[in-house]
Image (cartoon, helix red, strand yellow):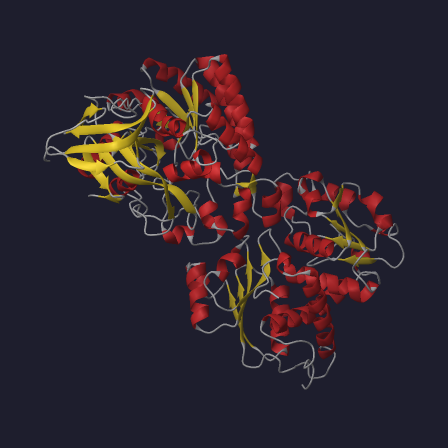
Amino acid sequence: MAEQRIVFRGIRIIDPASGRDETTDVATEGAHISAVGPEATAAGAQVVDGDGLVLAPGLVDMHTHLREPGFEHKETVETGTRAAAAGGFTAVAPMANTDPVADNAAVIHEVRNLAARAALCDVFPVGAITRGLAGEEMAELGEMVEAGVRMFSDDGQCVQDARVLRNALTYARAFEDVVLAEHCEDAALAEGGQMHEGLHSYSLGLAGQPREAEEVIVARDLAIARLTGGRLHLCHLSSAGSIEMVRRAKAEGLRVSAEVTPHHLVFCDEDLRTYDTNFKVNPPLRSPEDREALRAALADGTIDVVATDHAPHAVEEKETEFDYAPPGTIGLETALAAIITYLVAPGLLSLSSAIEAMSVRPARILGAGEHGGPLEPGRPANLVVFDPSAEWMVEPPFVSRSRNSAFLGTTLQGRVMYTALRGELVVADGKPQR
Amino acid sequence: MNRHLLSIHDVSAEDIVRILDTAESFREVGTRVIKKVPALRGRTIVNLFYENSTRTRISFELAAKRLSADVINFTTSGTSVSKGESLKDTALTLQAMGADAIVIRHSSSGSPFTLTRWVKGSVLNAGDGTHEHPTQALLDMYTMRERLGKIEGLRVAIIGDVLHSRVARSLSFGLVKMGAEVTLVGPPTLIPPDAPAWGVQVSYDIDGVLPKLDVCYMLRVQRERQRQQYFPSVREYSRLFGLTNARVGMLPEGSLIMHPGPMNRGVEIDSDVADLPQSVIEHQVTNGIAVRMSLLYLLLGGSGTGEVGADG
């Protein structure tokens, strides 16, 4: 690859890691940022007029499903990372529920190899906590740590056996900065649940999954975090009650972080009235009151991270009876715009806080040191450039191989124009370049 | 009226009156020697049944035949459904064959909604999962109006497994819309906690409710629920929530006993109670045909009641 040189001229740079939010020039040379400041130049550089645009550290998604190996009809490392780049992400963490499950170093290496060949963003594979996601025997965490894994999760499943989780959280303390991420769902309370249990589930005749199915596990996991001193991350929280517990746990000083998805921040159980399977997600979309609590928790920092839970499914899998459809919505291409539209534009969250939640903090949790800023000379040029006011309608085609988006048909504000991965413009004028 | 009947929410109070009035004209057709009118001659109606229900299917089939429509029954056994063809492909096939209306029964809630995405004709919900069964609610309201002269102001208790009952949902919504006073009765495990938001009362005490009723509507107990521990035993259920011989005397004179069928005699309703004169369960069945004729006629472009029964 030829040394790419780019100058973003007169652009608003938002870099929470350095506290910078100003309009200036940013230059890259090869894989790195070469200059930040007025009149930054690089000889022979491509010049991007930054008028009306924002430049920020590339987004980092700590909760993605790339589906490869095993479910290539839904997504692959190549198509999923292309969708990620289109959405402004420079790093993603694909979950372990592939086939075979990423519960050993060999599968981790396989995903890394696929990424090395074809990915348009960096890939940080998540390892399974237990063998086969079965919740019974601990997977070989140490070997996966040696293969570079920093986060473990049985996502999709929740470790039901409290002793297994206790041992895993304790064992993982042997490794520096390793985090265990839990999909909080009590299997018995959630069994068969198609949507949030409440007025709407009763009226629609869909089996409900009460918010308590999440809350009892959040309560249990926080207690185990206290018991073990382990580092715990709570995935895609959906209920106001969970937020309260996380708030108290943080005040107490437990080593816990939490995430929320754009779809839980935007939609609610009322949206299922037409039985649109794109709104069937897990955890389910909850009440408007829960959604308000999630928004407030993101704004006040109780929730650390926005993660997509990008969950691609083939058309025929979703175009079916509601009961039969698998849960999940894609989200990589809409995440930033959803947060701008529903949180930044109404004044609930500053753009800088949004970048913290979508880049700085997830990069830190994943140990992705090349991502999340600070944007300073000599640092890797992993960047996103977006137009925070451009409006667009969400409709196919998607860059993702799948199109099961809960946002279909909505108009969003905020459009990714450029994504730079180590100085290479993998997305330019809103389009992936390879 | 809407093109489809997916939920009782699809019909307004005025629509309900119109459906019941039209059914009244068709009720007479069923008493003739030749029980047939040419109202839907040449139209094609498909009964798409993913769930076994002989009585509902026969009722729709008779309704369509009495309107002279061509009827095709498409059920789970012996068709592509059992070969695993998707609902979408089945719908596209029926669409290609020119179905004017599809009557669908399915074990998954919302399937009739899903079906409307792929067909141009009318879709009638003949029961979907634990969601709704709007034609049952309409025929029940017809029966109440026929027997008691009105719906508004009637005091109706719906007793049993409301949580899993599509009949209870449609009937509750429909009766509330028509101004009746509805009380849901059953064990707390089988009453949706948010039911009061439907505009109904909730009681766990059948004996406190029975003396104040115009209509006592019993729901079928599904025995498999007992295995899921919604209640301790069928015996205890029957004792606490069944309409027993001992209990039936608490009902005011002139009140009705109804049941959507099929009944579990001896479980939710004692056998002798089911056969009392005030029990109108068979009338419900007869009226069901007239109400379904009315719906098919109105949904498939009938212009009113004028030509009904004009010849035969």
Would residue B85 be visible to someone looking at this image?
A: yes
Query: Where does the image place residue A343, in percent across and percent down from the top left?
Result: 46, 34
Q: In this view, does A94 lie to the left or right of B153?
A: left
> Could you tell me which quadrant the C terminus of chain A lies in?
top left
Dividing the picture into quarters, in which one does residue A129 lie?
top left
> Could you tell me which quadrant the N terminus of chain A lies in?
top left
Dividing the picture into quarters, in which one does residue A320 lie?
bottom left
Query: Where does the image place residue B72, in percent across and percent down from the top left?
Result: 52, 73
Would residue A67 be visible to someone looking at this image?
A: no
Question: Residue at the spot x=18%, y=35% of the render?
Answer: A424
Question: Residue at the spot x=52%, y=47% of the render?
Answer: A272
Depth check: give the residue in front, A203 or B242.
Answer: A203
Q: Is residue B59 left or right of residue B157?
A: left
Q: In this view, does A177 lie to the left or right of B2?
A: left
Depth check: give the residue in front, B281 or B215.
Answer: B215
Query: Where does the image place residue B22, in percent across and percent down from the top left?
Result: 70, 72
Work out whether B294 lies above or below A60.
below
Q: How many marks?
A: 0
Question: Residue at the spot x=77%, y=54% of the render?
Answer: B180
Query: Where does the image place residue B159, in percent across and percent down from the top left?
Result: 74, 49
Depth check: give the residue in front, B197 or B108.
Answer: B197
Extreme residue toward the right, this view: B253
Work out whether B59 lies above or below A300.
below
Question: Residue at the spot x=55%, y=50% of the render?
Answer: A273
Dividing the picture into quarters, in which one does residue A44 lie?
top left
